[in-house]
Image (tube, rainbow, N blue to C red):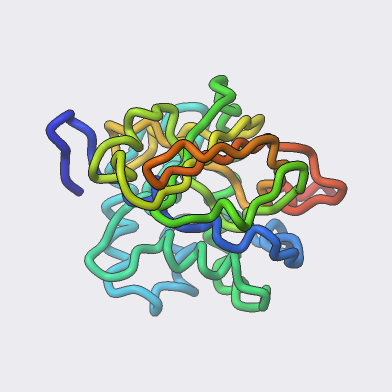
Amino acid sequence: MSASAGGHEWNPRLIEDTCDEPEAYLQPLDGYQESDLVSLEEAIEPIKSLFRNLPRDAWIAKNALKNPVNGLTPDEAAAIHLYTMETRTRSLYLILNEMLRDRDRRKLQPWFLYLKLFITALFKISPCSVKVLWRGVKSSLHSKYHRGQRYIWWAFSSCTLSLEVLEQPMYLGKTGTRTLFSIECMNGKAIKPYSYFQKEDEILLLPGFYFEVVGKVNAGNGLHIIQIREVTPPHVLLEHPFVVS
């Protein structure tokens, strides 16, 4: 993690390319909600072999957030913190988001305990009051999104409240091939109080984010802006984490 001259921390999730398969219609995220709600240490047990020091990172996350806000338990808050942590090798969020975009939903089963804890925490956070968010990608995606069409993002997607953040050289900058999403959102979750990155107003979109493209603009200098609006899907794409008996 490093800081720019403007005091912002480098948060690579803000330009992580999880938007490159918008036409993939996968099975909904289901089954995780039936898992027990356990401690963070127990939740990572089935996936710890995928990482070099996951128990250590979980310990750091638990100690970083001993008094969480918004009614989250320490384990729930730590699950968010762990998601936001960067590591020398591939970070947890990268591998998790790959699994969420994989057609073989069986690959997600080892993640169910962690997803139960993580998504439970996110559901406890009230939706962000700011309704227009920004997300950037350092590639050209405008040809994959068509006005009036509806798409799904299957991974967790990180957004920012500030367009100025994405204009910094460490993110999109002001030259080169870039795609900027302007997102009208109903259910974004503000995770700054729980994040490893304390200087960025990161808003997280949950898996199964269903939206319509309402506009496209070629802004010049390699920048394309895609305006999207969250809409209610015809079927549940992300099951509620709280099982109702």
Residue depicted at 16% across the width and 39% down the height:
3
Could you tell me if residue 2 is visible in this image?
A: yes
Residue 135, given in percent of the width and then of the height, sits at 47, 41
Quarter-of-image position of residue 14? top left
Quarter-of-image position of residue 161? top left
Total numbered circles: 0
Residue 103 drawn above or below residue 85: below
Residue 201 drawn above or below residue 226: above
Pick out the residue farthest to the front. Answer: 220
Residue 40 drawn above or below residue 210: below
Q: Nearer the viewer, residue 80 or 42?
A: 80
> Does residue 38 appear to the left or right of 220 in the view shown?
right
Q: Nearer the viewer, residue 24 or 154?
A: 24
Residue depicted at 32% across the width and 33% down the height:
165
Residue depicted at 55% across the width and 67% down the height:
111
Pick out the residue farthest to the top. Answer: 129
Residue 110, given in percent of the width and then of the height, sits at 56, 73
> Does residue 72 appear to the left or right of 60 in the view shown?
right
Residue depicted at 33% across the width and 39% down the height:
65
Residue 56, given in percent of the width and then of the height, sits at 27, 63
Quarter-of-image position of residue 35? bottom right
Could you tell me if residue 38 is visible in this image?
A: no
Residue 113, given in percent of the width and then of the height, sits at 57, 62
Q: Nearer the viewer, residue 156 or 32?
A: 156
